[in-house]
Image (cartoon, rainbow, N blue to C red):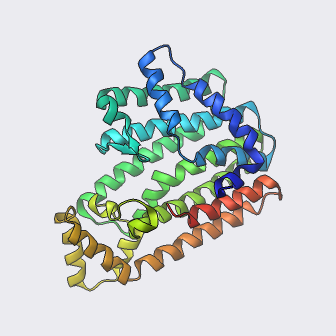
Amino acid sequence: MSTVDKIKAPIVKEMEEFEVKFKASMKSDVSLLDKITHYIVKRKGKQLRPIFVFLCAKTVGEITDATYRAASLIELLHTATLVHDDVIDDSNERRGFFSINALWKNKIAVLVGDYLLSRGLLLSVDNGDFDLLRIVSQAVREMSEGELLQIEKARNLDIEEPVYFDIITKKTASLIASCCGCGASSASKKKEDVERMGEFGLLTGIAFQIKDDLFDYGSYDDIGKPTGIDIKERKMTLPLIYALNNAQNGDKRRIINIIKNHNTNRTKVKEAIDFVNSSGGIEYAEKKMHEYKDKALEVLMTFPESKARNSLEQLVLYTVNRKK
């Protein structure tokens, strides 16, 4: 049994039922749309976001119909953002498979993303889930702001640590926070439960993104995908920010020049990766990641012990120990 399967143990039946409901939420009378959404469902990932929703709901109360709608809403909106991201990034792959835009071109991909977004919104509106819609809409707004802030800063490579944390809080952590907040909101009427679960999700999401950033400095054999992608895309991640902030002026100018002007040169990119590895950037980022993980667990431990809470604890540990 995999780690994720063990984590899912308290909600395995609910996740099976969610699969059915999620497929139904994407149904369309247009055969092309049905064909594309079927392709999306078949190539789903680990479904960590619905797992967060169900485990958080079960930690604070009982899973309800609203919990299933919350998980579907988040998964629909998240999938829509991924489809749109692939168009923006001109990416032909997603999780090792062809992206929607690679198979059906950009125009269709954008329309499919819009369709998934509308299905999520209508699912909430039709059932009066306005609290869930508010939580998720705030996350979508923050994700857009975070993406634009990162693009703005990438032009000048002038990201300092506080700006980096602002970006990843908006871009990544806000969605995990919305999963946890929606899960709690679907099962508890206590505002405090929803806020604490949202805080737990935010802290977990920050640790999750730092871990993702660290993958860029590993080896292909370790993680099974190319390294140096963030450098090629001129993304200033925590290991790189730390290394540059603690570098001699000459080294700093050299590495910034590589990122600005030689980010497609494999030899030069490796030089930048080696610089970060030898400058303490990895150790510093790992230390920060564990700080956020510990803070997340502190918040989680304020909830009563249960199988669901234990699984959430394991899920947090999984986010910082995963290999890819």
Q: Residue at x 77, y 50 (%)?
A: 59
Q: Residue at x 62, y 54 (%)?
A: 201
The answer to whether residue 127 is seen in the rendering is yes
Q: Nearer the viewer, residue 182 or 100?
A: 100
Q: Quadrant of the N terminus?
A: bottom right
Q: Is residue 8 left or right of residue 108?
A: right
> Which residue is most to the left?
261
Locate residue 63: give its quadrant.
top right
Residue 312 position, x and y percent, is 70, 56
Locate residue 164: give its quadrant.
bottom left
- Looking at the rendered structure, the number of numbered marks drawn on it comes to 0
Residue 105 position, x and y percent, is 29, 30
The answer to whether residue 244 is seen in the rendering is no
Residue 146 position, x and y percent, is 41, 51
Q: Nearer the viewer, residue 55 or 18?
A: 18
Residue 283 position, x and y percent, is 47, 79
**Vertical placement of 75 versus 294: above or below?**
above
Q: Residue at x 77, y 48 (%)?
A: 10
**Vertical placement of 247 versus 105: above or below?**
below
Q: Nearer the viewer, residue 135 or 74?
A: 74
Q: Is residue 292 left or right of residue 66?
A: left
Q: Is residue 198 left or right of residue 151?
A: right
> Which residue is most to the bottom?
248
**Vertical placement of 271 versus 98: above or below?**
below
